[in-house]
């Protein structure tokens, strides 16, 4: 079976367009208002299968959140609730309730937001300088 040059060029153009669309960078939020809108939903902090911790946290529009932190080595799971806000590109918050004394109510956190898109959330932790990467949790559905 012979493939004509026209079909080969068409197929090449389609593959190129699909690759170009697939490599497109997501638009990052630029303002606190955009970030406050994008953060709503469930995010996962997971540095891979060799990471000691896995965390899921769901942010509500009213500035509250719920989540859990799982120690993969011990299997210990800490449930928590917190209050959060984004102001001048900083993500700050305070623990409200916790199932473990290692994460005490009243503990505060503050991080510099590096980049937030619809599916990625990158921050630098104040004090430690650790860069954290969160991705949006997606649910699988057939409908």
Image (spheres, rainbow, N blue to C red):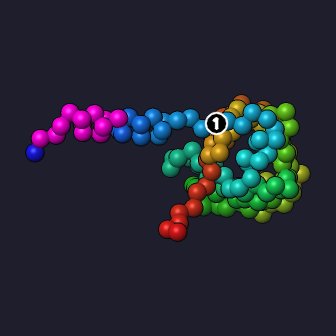
Image position of 126 (left or right of 72): right
Image position of 68 (left or right of 90): left
Identify which residue, 92 or 54, lies in the foreground.
92
Which quarter of the figure has residue 120? top right
Residue 76, horizontal then vertical, whole percent: 65, 61
Image position of 26 (left or right of 34): left
Task: Check the image and name the residue furthest to the left.
Answer: 1
Identify which residue, 75 or 106, lies in the foreground.
106
Q: Is residue 97 visible?
A: yes
Residue 62, horizontal then vertical, whole percent: 86, 56
Task: Check the image and name the residue furthest to the right.
Answer: 106
Identify which residue, 41 or 103, lies in the foreground.
41
Residue 136, horizontal then vertical, whole percent: 63, 51
Task: Check the image and name the residue furthest to the front.
Answer: 6
The residue under the point 79% across, 45% down is 36
Identify which residue, 19 or 68, lies in the foreground.
19
The residue under the point 76% across, 42% down is 35
Magenta stretch, residue numbers = 2-13
Q: Is residue 109 visible?
A: no
In the figure, 44 relative to 89: above or below? below
The residue under the point 16% across, 40% down is 3
The quadrant the N terminus occupies is top left
| Majority secondary structure in the magenta region | helix
In the figure, 143 relative to 41: above or below? below
Q: Which residue is mark 1?
A: 27
Residue 10, horizontal then vertical, whole percent: 30, 37
In the figure, 54 relative to 17: above or below? below
Residue 52 colored in magenta in the image: no
């Amino acid at each position: 079976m012979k493939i004509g040059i026209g079909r080969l060029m068409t197929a090449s153009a389609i593959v190129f367009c699909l690759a170009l669309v697939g490599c497109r960078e997501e638009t990052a939020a630029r303002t606190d208002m955009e970030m406050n809108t994008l953060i709503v939903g469930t995010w996962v902090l997971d540095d891979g299968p060799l990471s000691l911790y896995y965390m899921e946290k769901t942010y509500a529009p009213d500035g509250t959140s719920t989540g859990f932190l799982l120690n993969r080595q011990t299997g210990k799971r800490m449930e928590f609730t917190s209050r959060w806000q984004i102001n001048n590109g900083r993500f700050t918050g305070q623990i409200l309730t916790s199932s473990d004394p290692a994460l005490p109510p009243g503990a505060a956190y503050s991080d510099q937001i590096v980049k937030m898109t619809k599916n990625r959330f990158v921050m630098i932790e104040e004090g430690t300088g650790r860069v954290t990467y969160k991705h949006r949790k997606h649910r699988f559905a057939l409908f």
